[in-house]
Image (cartoon, grey):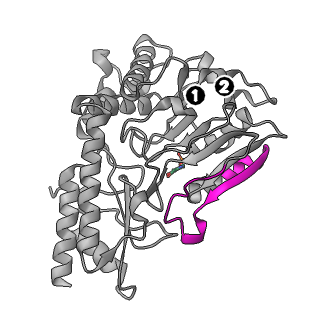
Amino acid sequence: MKKIYNFSAGPACLPNPALKASKSAVKDYKKSGISILEMSHRSAPIVELFDDTTQNLINLLDIPENYSVLWLQGGASLQFSMVPMNLLPSDGTADYIDTGSWSAKAVIECQKFGNVNVVGSSKDSVYSYIPKNVVTSEDASYLHITSNNTIYGTQYKSFPEIKNTNSYLVADMSSDILSKPIDISQFGLIYAGAQKNMGPAGVTLVIIRKDLLDINLRDVPTMMRYKTHSSKDSMFNTPPVFSVCVVNETLKWIQSLGGLKEMEIINERKAEKLYTEIERNSLFKSPINKEDRSTMNVPFVFLDKKIDDKIFLDYCLNRGLTTLKGHRSVGGFRASIYNAMPEDGVDALIEAMQNFEKNY
Ligand SMILES: Cc1ncc(COP(=O)(O)O)c(C=O)c1O
């Protein structure tokens, strides 16, 4: 069979060892004779799986003791609402930086619970850069950012500093969690849908500073309170056991490569080669400000707008390079090169770009 490289933005490619282990868990989990899909979440092997997954995440991200790790459902999109519901008083203000469609959606949800101050936006230039030196509101409960913008391909290289000691950073890290080491203590809360860099859809990670669990501002529905889930170790109701199993196998794979420092080196090397080719190739260009370019999602377009994108997409597809179409709001191409995209896949894409240039 021809080797296929899947450049999808999410759900995205997963590491082979994680897929293999997950396949075996579906057949017969830990020699129990039954599939993980059939097991009660109250059973000892599954409680152990959740503990192990949480511990593996703590080890990889070096999460301090004053943080709780939650495995939730509802996707990153539910976090757009859960964050303000739990953390923003109705007469309070939250600062948001608007770096793309996902941040804009988070703003809309927050406005339903309190006041939003958009303290920075790159909308004026089709989100091609990360706004810097933003001035935060004096009384803001928190500052919300999207650390990596999946659609536009921008990424924070350093996070904004907050001077007000009562305030804290909240980050949607759906598309770059586990791509590099981060200092968790800079954040009050981090959330991420799993289906890009961590596992399959169905589970959403929340890392929350423990003191924020006790904020009690309004009558939040039980399932939407962080405290509900932290007090039951993410087992208040039936959790997405299989998704968590795949996440755990993915975490073990990252650890086997040498952890997040090594992952960062690999990711930077892959991104650097691809951006270098985009710059060199006479047919393509990157629409993104150089210093803000994402190591995870790499959009590029034809310099000559008259060339039909489909010609290059078909050319790639014939070579086993799939899902390279840019998001419908941007057009062109987008190569999502998350942790699990092998370097060979990036090399194959570069070779396709070079051959296309020669033959076009
Ligand atoms: C940065 C970012 N935030 C939020 C979302 C929405 O995630 P979900 O589909 O898990 O709600 C996505 C999905 O692509 C995303 O890339």
Using the image as rendered, state which of residue 153 and residue 162 is in the foreground: 162
Quarter occupied by residue 9 = bottom left
Q: Is residue 127 magenta?
A: yes
Q: Dot 2 surroundings within 10 Å: few (below 14), some, or many (20 or more)? A: some
Residue shown at the point (49%, 69%) measured from the top left: 328
Position of 95 with respect to 51 (left or right) is right
Q: Indicate the amino acid at tag 2.
A: Leu
Is residue 253 depicted above or below 48 in this figure?
below
Quarter occupied by residue 260 = top left
Give the residue furthest to the right. Answer: 91
Position of 225 with respect to 100 (left or right) is right
Q: Quadrant of the C terminus?
A: bottom left
Is the residue at mark 1 in contact range of ligand 1, meaning its CB lies under 8 Å from it?
no
Q: Indicate the amino acid at tag 1.
A: Ile
Q: Is residue 29 visible?
A: yes
Q: How many marks?
A: 2
| Image mark for residue 212 | 2
Q: Dot 1 surroundings within 10 Å: few (below 14), some, or many (20 or more)? A: many
Q: Quadrant of the N terminus?
A: bottom left
Using the image as rendered, state which of residue 2 and residue 120 is in the foreground: 120
Residue shown at the point (48%, 70%) measured from the top left: 330
Residue where numbered disc 1 is placed: 208
Using the image as rendered, state which of residue 325 and residue 171 is in the foreground: 171
User: Pointer 2 and pointer 1: residues touching (CB < 8 Å)?
Assistant: yes
Give the residue furthest to the bottom. Answer: 306
Position of 321 with respect to 183 (left or right) is left
Q: Which residues are magenta?
A: 106-135
**Badge 1 element:** strand
Using the image as rendered, state which of residue 106 and residue 315 is in the foreground: 106
